Image (cartoon, rainbow, N blue to C red):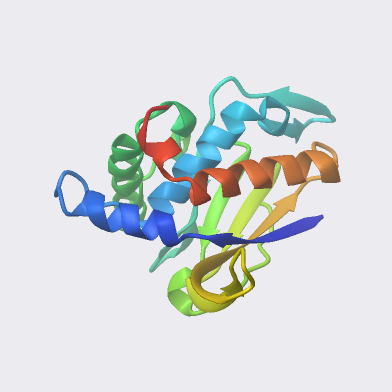
Amino acid sequence: FYLSLDVDVCRLLALREELNGFGVERLTLNHFIVAALGRALRDEPAANRVWIDDQILQFETSDVGVAVDTGRGLFVPVLRDAGGLALVEVARRTQALVERARDGGLSVADTSGGAVTVSNAGMHGVAYMTPIINPGQAMILGVGSVRELFRPDAEGRPELRREIGLVLACDHRILDGVAGLRFLNRVASYLEQPLKLVLGA
């Protein structure tokens, strides 16, 4: 089943620009999303499971797959324990995995495990992407482009927002609708309050 949310990323984009000004590690929107997924898996252990051989396997670490488009097709390396890493370390390790995927240097271990993958189609100008769960996992998060639009503020006046559309596909053998919404709202909360991703894992 599928769940979708529009997430305000104004604060996230402003924070990313400020952090990138320090030149420590170039942060992308995807790095924040990977970190948010990792933290949400840690916060919601009931979502950090998969269905294998007619039984449920519970993961101990918050591993997150990252879909990477290469000249040889789509590959999904898995970042280990994303929820336990500092944001800068998430960025560093994710970038290393992406480069290995594009260079054809991934091992079998690099592409196995994890309950969830992020598939970011934002660079292609789509508002929403409804993804298909990778075999062996329980969820996949489709990410759309950053869109500028007006929403009413607390007084009803139009306010310019920057939003992304998220679509979470869930395996109903692992999560019901309430558990899926709880997980997706955790992810959204981290993205809308990005300082929580910076202040520690």
Across and down, in percent, residue 10 comes to 43, 62
Decide if residue 134 is in sight here.
no
Q: Is residue 164 above or below residue 184?
A: below
Q: Residue at x 47, y 60 (%)?
A: 9
Across and down, in percent, residue 79 comes to 44, 38
Q: Is residue 58 left or right of residue 77?
A: right
Q: How many marks?
A: 0
Query: Residue furthest toward the front?
Result: 155
Q: Nearer the viewer, residue 150 or 99?
A: 150
Q: Is residue 66 above or below residue 63?
A: below
Decide if residue 13 is in sight here.
yes
Quadrant assignment for the N terminus? bottom right
Q: Residue at x 61, y 54 (%)?
A: 141
Q: In the figure, residue 119 lies in which quadrant? A: bottom right
Q: Nearer the viewer, residue 58 or 157?
A: 157
Across and down, in percent, residue 153 comes to 59, 67
Quadrant assignment for the C terminus? top left
Across and down, in percent, residue 135 comes to 68, 47
Query: Residue furthest toward the left?
Result: 23
Q: Is residue 32 left or right of residue 128?
A: left
